[in-house]
Image: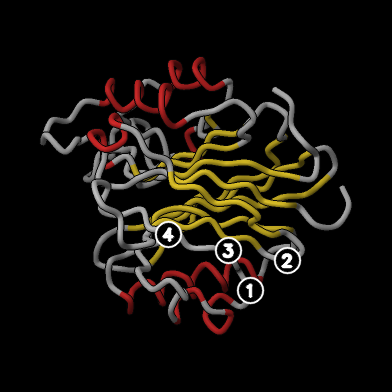
Amino acid sequence: MEVRSDVFKCISWNIHRGRGNDGIVDATRTLGVLKDEVWTPGNEALILQEADEETPPHRGLLDIAGLETETGLIHVHGEAGTRWGLESHGFLGVIVFLAPSLRVEDIVLLDLPGHCHRGAVIVDADRDGRKLRLIGTHLSLSQGLRIAQLRTLGQHLFRREPRQTILCGDLNEWRPWGGLALSRRVLGMEFSGPTRATFPVGWPVLPLDRVLATAPGRVQSLRVLDGPGIRMASDHRPLAAEIALGGHA
């Protein structure tokens, strides 16, 4: 897999816990759509949301070994402490896969406030000497809770060593300009990136899914993926992003 050192490519998708628009839960179908219509070589990260069952013990849904084989990526939640529980594949449905070329330095599972349990997976990695931080999350439908959740994330990041950061997932923010929740005032740092409508899957009008980056990085390309399998397998369309990495490795 050829990778440009100054560009980081990733895919984010809410897979709706394998429930298709026909009402059938079929994780095997989801994996097939990932392989045939979503994944492309050259991507260094895959971030999934709603990829574990909704209620405790939040059992995993996907064939992780099969997904690793199809993509060449590595499931970063191998250690028990990097998952919600022993039967989970990730943290509250958020699962991160990374290319073998990225060396994972640290993984933090961050609980976010709200009546519906939400969380963020924060992965610090070394990419050929360049320090990156990748955050996958799934935020609340309520704007007030999104503000509280991202304020919690911002306070956590304030206590960490600064590094170039990419935030992605189902942020449930329908405003193209991002609203208060995604502002520097709440997060404590500036995240930016274009918006693309991803929901509902059949005729997207709301940009609920986002890929955002901090300076000196820049989201230079953001595409909404589509296909007959995608339209059947979930209620969201996936996003494929290219982030130009600023600074030096």
Q: Earlier in the sequence, mark 2 or mark 3?
A: 3
Q: Nearer the viewer, residue 210 or 74?
A: 210
Q: Residue 227: x, y in percent? A: 34, 33
Q: Quadrant of residue 42?
A: top right
Q: Left or right of 240: which side holds 116?
A: left
Q: Left or right of 59: which side holds 150?
A: right
Which amino acid, mark 1? Glu
Q: Secondary structure at mark 3?
A: loop
Q: Is residue 178 visible?
A: yes
Residue 68 vertical placement versus 114 (above, below): above
Residue bearing the label numbered 2: 215
Please name which of the two marks, 3 or 1, marks the residue nearer to the observer: 3
Which amino acid, mark 4? Asp
| Whole-number angstrom distance, CA of label 2 to CA of label 3 | 11 Å
Coloring applied to the structure? secondary structure
Q: Secondary structure at mark 4?
A: strand
Q: Residue at x 69, y 59 (%)?
A: 218
Q: Earlier in the sequence, mark 4 or mark 1?
A: 4
Give yes or no for contact between labels 4 and 1 (Cβ–Cβ under 8 Å).
no
Give yes or no for contact between labels 3 and 4 (Cβ–Cβ under 8 Å).
no
Q: Quadrant of residue 189?
A: bottom right
Q: Residue at x 28, y 39 (%)?
A: 58
Residue bearing the label numbered 3: 193
Q: Earlier in the sequence, mark 2 or mark 1?
A: 1
Residue bearing the label numbered 4: 111
Q: Which mark is residue 190?
A: 1
Q: Earlier in the sequence, mark 3 or mark 4?
A: 4
Q: Residue 249: x, y in percent? A: 87, 47
